[in-house]
Image (cartoon, rainbow, N blue to C red):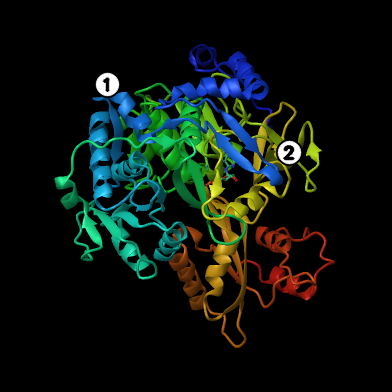
Amino acid sequence: MTDQDLYPVSADWASRAHMNKAQYEVARIAARENPEAFWAEQAKRLDWFTPPTKIKDVSFDKADFHIRWFEDGVLNVAYNCIDRHLAERGDQTAILFEGDDPSVSGALTYAELHRQVCRMANVLKDMGVKKGDRVTIYLPMVPAAAVAMLACARIGAVHSVVFGGFSPDSIAGRIEDCGSTVVITADQGLRAGKVIPLKANVDEALTKVSVEKVLVIAHTGADVPIVDGRDVRFEEAVKTVADDCPCEPMNAEDPLFILYTSGSTGKPKGVLHTTGGYLFWVSWTHELVFDYRPGEVFWCTADVGWVTGHSYVVYGALSNAATTLMFEGVPNYPDNRRFWQVVDKHKVEVFYTAPTALRALMRDGDEPVKSTSRKSLRLLGTVGEPINPEAWRWYHEVVGEGRLPIVDTWWQTETGGALVAPLPGATDLKPGSATKPLPGVELQLVDAEGGVLEGATSGNLCITDSWPGQMRTVWGDHQRFFDTYFSTYPGKYFTGDGCRRDEDGYYWITGRVDDVINVSGHRMGTAEVESALVLHEDVAEAAVVGFPHDIKGQGIYAYVTLNKGVEATDDLKKALVAQVRHEIGPIAAPDVIQWAPGLPKTRSGKIMRRILRKIAENGLGSLGDTSTLADPSVVDDLVKNRGG
Ligand code: 6R9
């Protein structure tokens, strides 16, 4: 098979979709030629307390760097996600819940969601939270997580959700960086039948940093210690609050949330998204890319701890009056039929997941899928990493029985929502390609020197103009925002991804070209893992690279140089893995640790990661130019002892 395999838009989809081919072309041109008018019109999909008259004010140039969208508009995100639906859809299910345990499920209508969000907002206010304050949320994938996010949005507090798989150290670092005064957590979470000690993790984090209050929600009902004066039991506090809470009028450019993400250097960055542009972008893309109609059952399997959960489980979906499904569990618990059983149980219509989950399920064959009906499904989606054509075809043929389009959506924490993705009524599909940019998204491929590449070619993926959902700053470090994304290729946003464009103008993301590893669709900075390793007293130096991994997409390969006289044992390897799990979380645990008597360095002392990547990939004989190595014998040893 070649990538010229084409899955054309069906006549049915073309006739009923929000956007067909002709409309897509018209929108592309309108957004490019008259952005003010185009976005002013599109932004009417939101309910504004004061509609914006200033639409776009952007410069990517160093001297005058700024990004502002809808800047005189006033709105509230919770109002758009809840209140405006109440009159017509108060009794419609807003959130469906499927627990880790298949016997546990539930549902919240929009009216109930409104009441719960108002009550949580009032609890937060009673705890002293005000507009602009930062609130850290560390919760399992349960409706309370969405309620907490919306409660913050309602009163203008800025949430920072920390994924439940992150360690106490990671929580502490994130609390400290954004100066949160309050943490919202639960007693425990559940995953594949195992308990996640959320409150205990928060307690440990708070031995390193302090906050004023911790709001503790009962989920499993476990008995967890309560610190007097600091911890507030939600179930107690909520007894005395009112059922209604007004929506704080927010400027379009007021912060909505901070979400930490890994980059090629340093500690994770606090990506900041604002109210108007972000909400507009996730709402618009959710409708277009999933060809969404209010009331359809939408299931995005991402955790709310990641941007995909923010944008499509919560904000995009609810702004479009969706019934959004929140799933606490994992694809293979109690067994590998779980995803499809949940689809049948809740009559899921749109299903959106990560390639890594598909690859893992594919390994178990077709039977677990075929034992279910899946007839409620009408559209499939993927996100997080490139999908290999083999997994794409399996998804299409086995899960979708050949009848469902697949939308492969390329985007980043920084972009707020999807930027490159097919529209099911407008874009013919090619397995493995995220296809084409959405209207208003201006892509460019450049070479290492920044030279613009035309036609069918490969290069570094840049975006030459802003879109409303673009991040606005790195929390507390605006210079880092500029330096990270706009200094490599002046005047352009650099994504960090490599990409190929084929002769039909389709984009094929090839993966990160920086020192970021994509492990099961989650970003991990090599520098972060290295820092965690060198914290160990026996470690002199460490270098971490990604390598191809059948299920995870990329695995983590660590080269470790021990201090003189330290014995290189398997127990020490285990201790190092444990160290990384403790410092960052289980997702950062190295798959391979290789003892390295020395690391390949240039004469100026820079580690040559290119060579380490090659060795990890087993790309022997193709190590490339090694003439700048200070000590070539180092490489011979690493090649000889590859893999451990
Ligand atoms: C939404 C999300 C962003 C990085 C991105 C790229 C990779 C995401 C992809 C994809 C190929 C896709 N990525 N979607 N690569 N095809 N459809 O995943 O955000 O966690 O910030 O990761 O993920 O490398 O740069 P985030």
- Which of the 4 image quadrants contains residue 106? top left
Q: For mark 2, give the secondary structure.
A: strand
Q: Amino acid at mark 2?
A: Leu
Give percent across and percent down for residue 84. 33, 25
For the point 28% across and 52% down, the residue is: 128
Q: Nearer the viewer, residue 34 or 323?
A: 34
Q: Amino acid at mark 1?
A: Ala
For the point 37% across and 66% down, the residue is: 205
Using a 10 Å C-alpha cutoff, classify the residue at mark 1 as few (fewer than 14 neighbours), some (14 to 19) or many (20 or more): few
- Residue with the mark numbered 1: 87
> In which quadrant of this rendering is ligand 1 seen?
top right
Among the two numbered marks 1 and 2 on one chain, the one whose residue lies closer to the N terminus: 1
Q: Is residue 1 visible?
A: no
Residue 205 falls left or right of residue 605: left
Whether pointer 1 and pointer 2 mark residues with C-beta atoms closer than 8 Å, the reply is no
Residue 515 falls left or right of residue 334: right
Give percent across and percent down for residue 78. 35, 35
For the point 33% across and 42% down, the residue is: 155
- Residue with the mark numbered 2: 445
Q: Nearer the viewer, residue 552 or 64?
A: 64
Instruction: Report the number of discs.
Output: 2
- Which of the 4 image quadrants contains residue 434? top right
**Furthest-right residue in this view:** 627
Give percent across and percent down for residue 327. 34, 42
Q: Nearer the viewer, residue 227 or 194?
A: 227
**Is residue 267 shown above or below 42?**
below
Quarter of the figure that contains the C terminus: bottom right
Q: Nearer the viewer, residue 117 or 531?
A: 117
**Furthest-bottom residue in this view:** 565
Q: Is residue 549 visible?
A: yes
